[in-house]
Image (cartoon, rainbow, N blue to C red):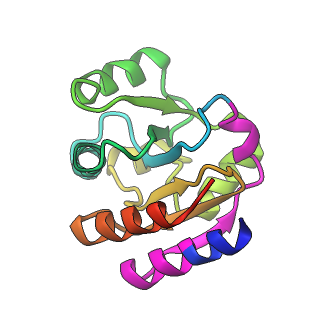
Amino acid sequence: MSGLLISLSFGISYYSGKTRYVDCPFCLEKFSKEPNGTWIWIYPGLVGCGKKCPLALEALRRFQERFPEVKSSFYFLVTDPSESEEDIQSYLAYYRKSLSIQALKPESEEEIRFYRKLGAYLPVHPSLKSRDEHGTQFFLVPPNRKSMYLLPKLGEKEWIEIRNEIDSITY
């Protein structure tokens, strides 16, 4: 299986340019309730974002629409730990009309440090959040839940290559 992950990492890196592959120390436990064979897509964003997040969530929706046979779960990583559950659900309600997406909140300092290290923006001061500045990369967790791919973008070219790599892996 590790050879297949290296192959997936190489394939995605080759076609999308700056993709990185990292070990995920908590993904196995965090996503243990996801069905076997499911690929987990995570987009880190800010509740209320009106710039980058809508475009990113639309890219996920289009991937799901284009490749419905790929077993996928979608998560919106809430990058501001002070957001209320009500605000999170209200923000995601619009997107849930066309994408089955769940909120994902870091539950430990380990997770927060991990996501910060990967470039997910977690505001430490309200003025930073008000500028609506955060990263735009996607995180992809394969079915083995041991690693995470960092995808700088998710467009047509990346969809096709990711789909081809997913097809090449046997579970």
Left or right for 33, reference 18: right
- Residue 91, image quadrant: top left
Q: Quadrant of residue 31?
A: top right
Q: What residue lies at 68% left-to-right and 52% top-to-bottom?
A: 144
Q: Is residue 139 in sight in this rendering?
A: yes
**In the rendered view of the protein, which quadrant contains the N terminus?**
bottom right
Q: Is residue 11 left or right of residue 133?
A: right
Horizontal side of 138 relative to 26 (left or right) equals left
Q: Position of residue 16 (x, y in %)?
A: 38, 77
Is 112 in front, or is 102? 102
* Residue shown at 64% from the left, 76% from the top: 6
Q: Is residue 24 left or right of residue 84?
A: right
Residue 17 image position (x, y, % from top left): 40, 83
In the image, what residue occupies the spot 22% across and 42% down?
Answer: 50
Taking the magenta stretch, the answer to whether it contains residue 12 is yes
Residue 118 percent across, percent down from the top left: 58, 63
Residue 78 vertical placement versus 42 (above, below):
above
Q: Is residue 103 above or below residue 77?
A: above
- The residues colored magenta run 8-32
Nearer-the-camera pick, 98 or 135:
98
Q: Is residue 108 visible?
A: no
- Total of numbered circles in the picture? 0
The residue sitting at the top extreme is: 86
Residue 21 position by quadrant: bottom right
Is 79 one of the magenta-colored residues? no
At x 55%, y 63%, the residue is: 169
**Could you tell me residue 167's position as x and y percent?**
45, 61
